[in-house]
Image (cartoon, rainbow, N blue to C red):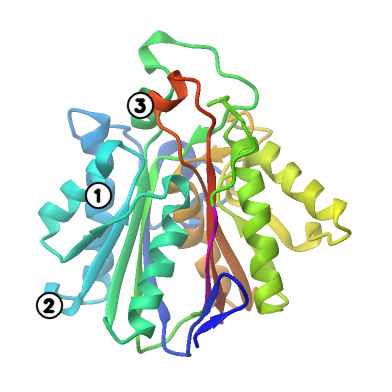
Amino acid sequence: MKKIGKQTFQIKDNVFVRDTFTIAGKKEGEGPIGNCFDLIVDDDLWGEDSWEKCELKFQKEAVKSLMQKNNLMENDIDILIAGDLLNQITSSSFAARDLQLPYIGVYGACSTMALSMGLGALMIDGGFASNVLCVTSSHFCSAERQYRLPLEMGGQRHMSAQWTVTGASAVWLSNGGFGPKIKNVTFGKITDLGVKDANNMGAAMAPAAYDLLNQHLTDTKVNYDLIVTGDLGTVGKSIVNKMFNEENNSIENIYDDCGTIIFDLEKQDVHAGGSGCGCSATVFGGFLYKKLLNKEINKLLFTSTGALHSPTATLQGESIPGIAHCVGIEM
C-alpha cells in the first residue's frame, strides 16, 4: 500500500519538480520576493481588452515559457493539470484550448496549486505519466469582480480582507532528471465552522489548514524545515498557530504563510495579506522552489488552502467551506 496513515500517499523517489516559470503583476513585483519571479507584468491588462483575457494570457505564457526554457515539445507532455478562480475555470480551459495539450481542469479555489501538483505526482508515481505540467493563476481585478464588488464601485475594503494575487506559475513534474522530489501527498477534508463573511477568507480556511497539517504530520512523522500555507494571511495564520498551541504542539518557529510572504504588509496596502490561487502558486514557483534548489531548506511542506464558496451561495446566506491540500517536498 502506498497510503500511510489516514489521508497521506507516499511517493517513491521518482517524482521530480524539474523546473518552474512564474509570472507576477506589478504590485507583486514590488513586494519583498519580487526578484524571484521570472517575469513581472506592469499592466493589469497586458495588452488584452479584459482582465479575464489577461489572466488567460498569464497561464498560457507561463506554460509556453516553461516549455521553451526546457526545450519541451508538445509530445513530451503527457498531461496539463490547471485551475483558477473564475466560473467554470475559464482561464485554464481557454489557455488549454490554445496550448493544445491533454488537459485536466481542477477546481480547488486557492488550494489548486498543491491539488494539481499532488494529482500530478500520483499519476507519475502510478506509471500513468512521465511529464506533467501544473499551472494555476489568479488576477486581482477579475476575482474582485466575481466574488466581491466591481472595482468601479470603489467599495470600502474590510481590514480582514486580502489582496488577490495577480500571477501564475507553471510547474514541471517528471519521472526523471534533477530537482526536489515530492515524497508525500495529503488531500484534505472540507471543514466548515460557519464563517459567512466573504471578506474574511483567512478565518474560513484556517480550520481546514489546521486539520490537514495535523493529519499530515501525524501520518508522516516528518520533521520539516518549513511549513507553508497558501493564503491565510495574518488572520488565518494567527488562527492556525492558536489551534496548534492549544494542543501544545506549536509549529510557529517553522511555519509561514504565502499571503504574508508575497507582500510587505507594512509598506503595501493589502490589509490582511495576499490571497487567490495565484498566491501559493507564485510564492512556490518563484521563491520556495529556489530555496529548495539552493538548499536553504531541505524539507518543505507546501500547503495550498481554499475557500469553496460562490457568489450565489454567499448571497443565499450559505457558509464558506474550507479545504486544504499539501505536498511534502524534499531536496
Residue 4 lies within the magenta run: no
Q: What residue is shown with label 2?
A: 75
Q: Which mark is residue 146?
A: 3
- Residue 39 in sight here: no
Q: Quadrant of residue 105?
A: bottom left
Q: Which mark is residue 264?
A: none
Residue 188 lies within the magenta run: yes
Q: Amino acid at mark 2?
A: Asn
Q: Which mark is residue 92?
A: 1
Circle 3 Cα neighbour tier, 10 Å, few/some/many (<14 / 14–19 / ≥20): some
Q: Is residue 170 above or below residue 152?
A: below
**Secondary structure at numbered mark 2:** helix
Q: Is residue 99 left or right of residue 14?
A: left
Q: Position of residue 207 (x, y in %)?
A: 66, 46
Q: Which residue is at a point 73% across and 77% down the rendered structure image?
A: 223
**Secondary structure at numbered mark 3:** helix
SS majority, magenta: strand
Q: Is residue 33 above or below residue 4?
A: above
Q: Which residue is at a point 74% across and 43% down the rendered structure image?
A: 239
Number of numbered discs present?
A: 3
Q: Position of residue 231 (x, y in %)?
A: 56, 45
Q: Which residues are magenta?
A: 184-189
Are dots 2 and 1 in contact, CB under 8 Å? Answer: no
Specify the quadrant that holds the C terminus. bottom right
Q: Which residue is at a point 66% across and 78% down the rendered structure image?
A: 220
